Amino acid sequence: MLSMLVWERLRPFTLTNRHSLVEYCKNLALLAVNIFVSKFMIIPITGFITYFNFWERSSEANLSVMLLDILLLDFWIYWWHRLMHRSNFLWRFHQIHHLDETLDTSSAIRFHFGEVILSAFARAPIILIFSIPLAHIIAFEAFLLICSFFHHANIGLPNKLDKLLSKIIVTPSIHWIHHKADPKDMHTNFCLFISIWDRIFNTSSTTKRTKKMNIGLPKQKDKDLLGLLLLPFQKS
């Protein structure tokens, strides 16, 4: 996270898309809430689920099996992300991430604690059916977090490097389109780690990222910290 913060300050993609100190603190406050929730709910829930797997795997460490598990979890999170955009109930929580009107590294940690809890329960069937060990889940979450810092960051890559990387992982030029304040684009580019699922399931956007692109939700304004925490529980 710190490396991305330094990168986007030294070589920003756009100078018109930067968080103020207050907005940084708001995103960090949401992170603090989620760290608290993770310690007392998410980690115990995940550990409990992995303890009651349907079948026993070999205890021998195997890198290829771990990579397959990461691919499987990434496939799951692609469809979960799509569902959050389709379900009115799930969108109540996920909209907090999209209400951010500026994109940078801190946007990667801006999530409502309700979404974090629901996501932990939603992946339980995948973990149980495929008997995914806790270590593989942690590895996936680490890769996902690193990639999330990267593809939210206010940075630009050389075109050739971007085209090469985007064939494998999600880059800022891909994910920024998902945050564009346009319904046509915000319901595309659902991949969060590996970029192949959007191409396979025809959810890729052809829109190009621009320096003056509007970020956020159409006809909606961002809220203060308390407003974001209460928003999912208010009458729509």
Image: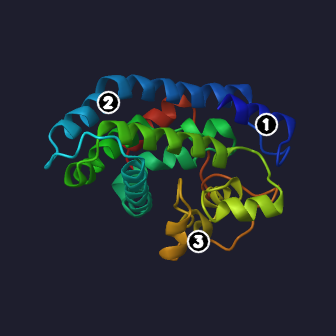
In front of the other: 49 or 215: 49
Where is residue 144? Give x, y as percent: 51, 45
Q: In the rendered image, which quarter is residue 176 located in?
A: bottom right
- Comparing 92 with 18, the one in front is 18
Tell whether label 2 touches label 1 (CB within 8 Å): no
Q: Is residue 112 left or right of residue 17?
A: left
Q: Residues within 10 Å of mark 2 (few under 14, many from 20)?
A: some
The amino acid type, in three-letter code, at marker 1 is Trp
Where disc 2 sits, the SS reads helix
Residue 103 is drawn in which quadrant?
top right
Q: How far apart are the two marked residues, 1 and 2, measured between alpha carbons? A: 31 Å
- Horizontally, residue 58 falls left or right of residue 114, namely left
Which dot marks residue 221?
none
Task: Report x, y in % for residue 8.
Answer: 78, 38
Residue at 56% in and 49% down: 98
The disc label shown at residue 7, or none: 1
Identify residue for label 3. 204
Of residues 74 and 208, the one drawn nearer to the viewer in this rendering? 74
User: In the picture, residue 217 is in which quadrant?
Assistant: bottom right
Q: Label 3 crowding class (10 Å Cα cut-off): few <14, some 14-19, many 20+?
A: many
Answer with mark 2 or mark 3, whichever residue precedes in sequence.
2
**Which one is earlier in the sequence, the residue at label 1 or at label 2?**
1
Q: CA distance from mark 2 to mark 3?
A: 33 Å
Residue depicted at x 61% and y 57%:
170
- Please name the residue that numbered disc 2 is placed on: 43
Under tag 3, what secondary structure?
loop
Instruction: Report the amino acid beneath label 2.
Output: Ile
The percent coordinates of residue 154 (x first, y second) are 75, 45
Q: Secondary structure at mark 1?
A: helix
